[in-house]
Image (cartoon, grey):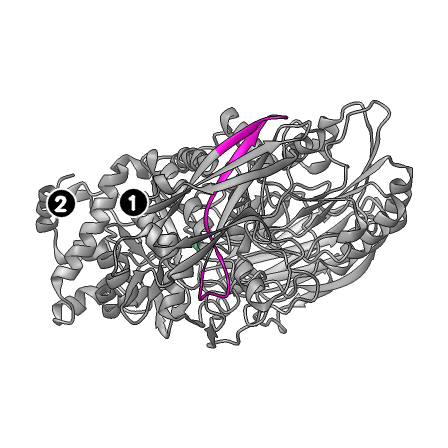
Amino acid sequence: MTQSNLDSLLDAMTLEEQVSLLSGASFWRTASIDRLGVPAIKVTDGPNGARGEDFSGGVRSAAYPVAIALAASWNPELVEEIGQDLARETRSKGARVLLAPTVNMHRNPLNGRNFECFSEDPLLASTMAVAYIKGVQSEGVAATIKHFIGNECEYERRTTSSQIDEKTLREIYFPPFEAAVKEAGVACVMTAYNALNGTHTSQNRWLIEQVLRKEWGFDGVVMSDWTATHSTVEALEAGLDLEMPGPAKHRGEKLVQAVRDGLIDPDLLRQAARSILALGARVGAKAEDEQTQERAEDRHHTRTLIRRAGAESAVLLKNNHLLPIAPKSDLRIAVIGPNAARATMFGGGSAQINAHYAVTPLDGIKDAFPLAKIDYALGCPGDRYVPLIKQPVEISFFQSTDLSGEPVLKQDGERSEFKWFGPVAPQVDHQAFSARLRCVYVPQETGDYEVGLMSAGTSRLSIDGAPVLEAWESWERGYSYFGHGCAERRTNVHLEAGRSYEIEVDYACGDGLTTTLKAIRFGLRAPSDFGSLDHAVTLARKADLVVLVAGLNDDWETEAEDRASLDLPAAQNDLIEAIAQENAKTLVVMQSGSPVTMPWADKVPAILQLWYPGQECGNALGDILSGRAEPAGRLPQSFPAVGEDLSPMTDRPKPHDDIVYSEKSHIGYRGFQARGTRPQFPFGHGLGYGKIELVRSEVLKSACTQQALVVVVTLTNHGDLEGSEVVQLYLRGKTERVSGLAAYSKVRLAPGETETISITVPRRAFQRWSARYEQWSIHDARFQLSIGTSSETLYFHHTIERDELSTDRQD
Ligand code: BGC
């Protein structure tokens, strides 16, 4: 659509119609104006899949590796391919806008959304974001980079203000957003829940108008995070185009009135409406979209892509001749651990999807070693909450908040959890309703069962009519369910095998305890689901080798909450120690979307960081163990050693606190350098299957220009297996305490192969933000360029004089 077409369309609109475009019409759609043929635009979350409308149990989608895993691949081409594929997934859900990527920085390793973000390093995060967005947008779907800015803490994210000085913002936190605008032409930007330096990001004029639009030239749509628009006039004046979700809280009639009262310049309104129309035209939104049903498209291409990406992003942290495993016919493998027989695909929150399928590590290993004898033991539970029961659960809804009257609707669920982000059904008032869940449970074993109950809204649970648990009188807001739910209530009950028990749960909302999100879950843990350390140890003793799959999951790492500690739940550390003592050939496979401490690291011969690799979880693991694929990842985040004090990054804010980024740019590996401590595993570390040596390096002076420096590096693979290496270039100015990643390149080498690669270091890597002159400039006259394979493993050092790069004396 041309500019003049847009103008005539805007001219033809009434004030009310223009205003209607500036807030969602519903949770996932902008407004349509049928009389003028303006279609609604549907959006969907991201980032590790395109979920569609339902938060839980919706139409199935492909589950891709989470963002920290993608960044661990250090392979922008792969990430671009995934972006393209995600665009197709987005279209399969009838949507035209993907609410991804998430590029907040790994400042705080306890952040509940650490898994959803790429890295602690701005360059790595920027290159990943650009690749992801280019991929998505090459298929005509709009990407939405989020959350702009300073959303590095989930705990109290709605009430806190991130206090970040401008130099730190420019050098550490802005780069992925800036690159997304300038290098990838990102279509949408989502502001953050938190405030920046005291002003809500959704109405921060400096942030949106000055930096994003004027300086970087952004010409797309700026939307608020869900329910994070806070004003009518200020937000529009600051440049916020779209209030999400709908229906409007601060716009709609309030905005119409503000224009009539002369409180807002109608041109601003027109500009914002134009952005929405331009987005619709850019992504090809059509009136028919509204009728489009969400589809589950389980494609072969996507399956292989996810499987490949799972291996390419897994990081071999340690390997004393254990991997890969030669498939012998008499091999006996003990597969142990809480994450072994379940596929842990992604973290929790809005990034969750209903995956097409899930391959567990146990199944993947069985498939990869068809001739081996495989034993399995749980060892200990890994759940944070009492596990859901997976069987039909009937739910009846009442049009009252005390379960009075006749049910107005009955539904059947597939498990013991229900979540509603928007209306349940037209006949149920979302703001005030009650519900009764019912199921008949027949235990498989006799013994003491653990029962759990948790809800956003009040709830109580009875078994055969006898009260067992309540969060009814005692309900109190906790941090579950995006901060709308209570803490889990737990107790034990004795149940007998083969008997039928009627479990009934009452649920009510409408008393102002909840906002948009309502949710209820209950769980049961059978005696054998606690696992047995003795059983696991016995299997480990008999096995040739052990694959111990430990880690976290979507309950531990989730939106609106941060982890309490870097440690694994204690039972898992005990399990690993006990198994390692029993079998010297123990591989620990760690599943987490953030660092965990590994106090047992010296006691096991091999550790593989698998992250949350999506639906092909077990297959990717099977490929790695059998050597069909290399674990070719490198850490995008430092893994701290036990006992490292990471405050102030890990300090928990109180409600309405300022979160002061007093460490400035010293996050991640920069922080370790500044403190003079060593992480357990440094940023950029990873072994792979090759034995690759960096033989020599040279700064190619003849090829250097004013804009860039060119470095050539020669590598040889001395090993018997094909392998990859990520060559990393770090730069440090003469007056600086720490160095920063300036460029990187991933190389793949066959056994015996030697290759010389050339890497370009852009001028920006030498520049720093001058707060005094408000511009980028090269401050130091001399730099040290170090070349290696992690932030701590550096082989070559070169001195670079500013004059070699620049003839521009002003710099
Ligand atoms: C999250 C966003 C997400 C939105 C819609 C918010 O809670 O912070 O990342 O896109 O919900 O689900």
Residue ID at (43%, 35%): 89
For disc 2, the neighbor class at 10 Å (few under 14, some 14 to 19, many from 20) is some
Residue 615 appears in view: no
Which image quadrant is residue 84 in? top left
Magenta stretch contains residue 750: yes
Give the quadrant of ligand 1: bottom left
Magenta stretch: give its range. Answer: 733-756
Is 62 or 368 nearer to us in this picture?
A: 368
From this view, report whether residue 186 is shown above or below residue 748: below
Q: Is residue 534 left or right of residue 675?
A: right
Residue 349 appears in view: yes
Looking at the rendered image, the quarter that the N terminus falls into is: top left
Residue ID at (64%, 33%): 690
Q: Does the closest atom of ligand 1 sit within 8 Å of the Cβ of label 2?
A: no
| Residue 357 x/y as whole percent | 59, 34
| Residue 585 x/y as whole percent | 83, 40
Q: Which residue is mark 2?
A: 6
Which amino acid does the dot numbered 2 rest on? Leu
| Residue 773 x/y as whole percent | 27, 69
Marker disc for residue 185: 1
Magenta stretch contains residue 777: no
For disc 1, the neighbor class at 10 Å (few under 14, some 14 to 19, many from 20) is many
